[in-house]
Image (spheres, rainbow, N blue to C red):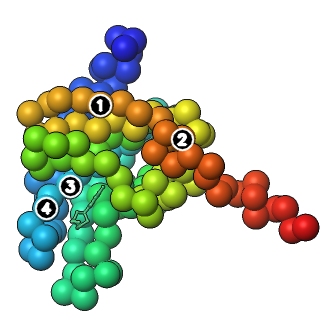
């Protein structure tokens, strides 16, 4: 892996684990953090925020994307998801679609375990044959 990407992983890891520590997850007790870097090199992070009405909970990736939009960013260059355990925490289906909205197919998604093991995949590997903005233009 190129050195620059390793440095990015290090930086995003610190932000994601710091966000994970703030996770509001009293129902699942499953704390997740996410951090991303935009094409303009802005950094944003977020954690999962649950609710007594369970389906209203928000994933960490979604929180990081909200922070990016609120902070004036628009394109995700790389995103990292910090797991609370020794397994990788891959984004849920809904979050794959949310990431893809602001990413190219080859945007990197780094999955990091509690002890720092890293697996890097592209968003296209996680969400092949994605339905994107271009598809909404094809009306017939
Ligand atoms: N969760 C995330 O925040 N990101 C993921 O990638 C997977 C799941 C959250 C949702 C819920 O608050 C908790 O983890 C358990 O599903």
Residues at marks 2 and 3 touching, judged by CB atoms closer than 8 Å: no
Ligand 1 placement by image quarter: bottom left
Ligand 1 neighbours mark 3 (CB distance < 8 Å): yes
Q: Which residue is mark 3?
A: 32
Is any atom of residue 58 visible in this view?
yes
Element under label 4?
A: loop
Q: Which residue is mark 4?
A: 30
Q: Which residue is mark 1?
A: 119
Residues at marks 1 and 4 touching, judged by CB atoms closer than 8 Å: no
Report whether 81 appears left or right of 95. left
Q: CA distance from mark 3 to mark 1?
A: 16 Å
Is the residue marked by circle 1 packed among few (<14), some (14-19), or many (20+) residues within 10 Å?
few
Is any atom of residue 18 visible in this view?
no
> Which of pointers 2 and 4 lies earlier in the amino acid sequence?
4
Residues at marks 3 and 1 touching, judged by CB atoms closer than 8 Å: no
Q: CA distance from mark 1 to mark 4?
A: 20 Å
Ligand 1 neighbours mark 4 (CB distance < 8 Å): yes
Ligand 1 neighbours mark 1 (CB distance < 8 Å): no
Is the residue marked by circle 4 packed among few (<14), some (14-19), or many (20+) residues within 10 Å?
some
Q: CA distance from mark 2 to mark 3?
A: 22 Å
Name the residue located 49 percent from the left edge and 39 percent from the top edge.
Answer: 125
Image vertical order of residue 5 relative to residue 136, above or below: above
Q: Which residue is mark 2?
A: 124
Residues at marks 2 and 4 touching, judged by CB atoms closer than 8 Å: no
Q: CA distance from mark 4 to mark 3?
A: 6 Å
Quarter of the image for residue 79 reads top left
Name the residue located 16 percent from the left edge and 43 percent from the top edge.
Answer: 87
């Amino acid at each position: 892996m190129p050195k620059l990407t390793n440095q990015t992983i290090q930086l995003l890891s610190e932000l994601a684990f710091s966000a994970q520590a703030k996770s509001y997850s009293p129902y699942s007790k499953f704390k997740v953090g996410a951090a991303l870097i935009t094409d303009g090199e802005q950094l944003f992070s977020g954690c999962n925020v649950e609710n007594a009405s369970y389906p209203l909970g928000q994933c960490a990736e979604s929180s990081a994307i909200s922070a990016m939009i609120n902070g004036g960013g628009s394109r995700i260059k790389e995103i990292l998801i910090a797991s609370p355990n020794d397994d990788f925490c891959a984004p849920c289906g809904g979050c794959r679609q949310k990431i893809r909205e602001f990413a190219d197919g080859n945007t990197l998604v780094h999955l990091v375990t509690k002890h720092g093991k890293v697996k890097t995949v592209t968003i296209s590997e996680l969400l092949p044959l994605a339905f994107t903005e271009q598809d909404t233009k094809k009306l017939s």
